[in-house]
Amino acid sequence: MKLDGKIGFLGGGRMAEALIKGILQAGLVENSKVVAIDPDQKRRDFLQKTFSVSTGKSHAQLSECAIIILAVKPQIMGRLLEECASWLTSKHLVISIAAGIPLSFIESRLQHGCRIIRVMPNTPALVLEGASALSPGKSATAEDVETAGQIFSAIGKSIVLPETYLDGVTGLSGSGPAYVFHFIDALIEGGVKVGLSRQDAELLVLQTILGSVKLAMETGMHPAVLKAMVTSPGGTTIAGLHELEKAGFKAGIMTAVEAATKRSEELGKLVG
């Protein structure tokens, strides 16, 4: 289902690139209805050449867009919102993907009644396999939430949650790719330690991770059940799992999510 009006991006970085790629591939809008604003000429040239979209330097060029996605660094969000406040109105659906910036921060700097949705995506969006959580602001409508859901489902999967859960989302899926890459790196090193070449270990590990995720998603079986399918009594897998538990593997992951969540809460308070 196509979206009405133009979509504008305030910021043309990697996440904006992923969104542009996703919405165009999904056919949500035509190339001519996408506008990306970025101060970097090289970045503007890249987006224009790659996606055949309009680009520019002035945020005022987005005033005619129905949907405006704030894809800038959190530390400059306050200044940009103040600069855009004169033309950003309730006619626009404003979607923020700036990490740690609460809805209240954005709402307090824009005109009363602005329709705002805050989204926490993650980096696998770059290959259209992202996980995003959406939280609507006070004036956002059910139709706005549906529109945002269409956009972020074009780069993976999305869910709608109250904003109070977004710090937890940040600690889990926002930071989660780093935990997964850390685990992948450790598995590769393990393969090297037992004599495999790094190239062979990397191939085996990446395919093992990919296959395991697909198995979990396509069967819908609980991870504990899938783990039991691999774990024979007295076999190699249970020996390895025992060592992971001795090292505090599961507790370590849970603590990492909790620590990242708390840090997200702290950062939110600094700007809120």
Image (cartoon, helix red, strand yellow):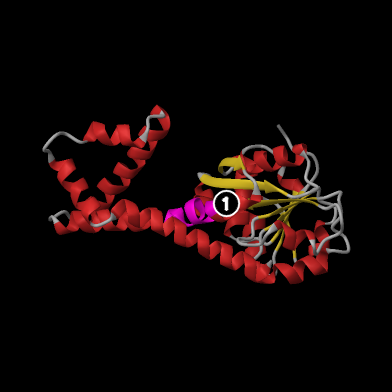
Circle 1: residue type: Pro
Residue positioned 16% across, 59% down in the render: 193
Q: Position of residue 37 (x, y in %)?
A: 72, 62
Classify 37 as above or below 212: below
- On the picture, is 155 further left or further right than 70? left
User: For residue 12, which quarter of the picture?
Assistant: bottom right
Decide which of 18, 235 is in the foreground and name it. 235
Decide which of 133, 126 is in the foreground and name it. 133
User: For residue 49, which quarter of the picture?
Assistant: bottom right
Residue wearing tag 1:
121
Decide which of 153, 248 is in the foreground and name it. 248
- On the picture, is 58 further left or further right than 25? right
Residue 175 counted in the magenta span: yes
Q: Position of residue 14 (x, y in %)?
A: 57, 58
Q: Position of residue 23 (x, y in %)?
A: 65, 43
Residue positioned 80% across, 43% down in the render: 5
Q: Which residues are magenta?
A: 168-178
In this orientation, does residue 58 appear? no
Q: Quarter holding the N terminus?
A: top right
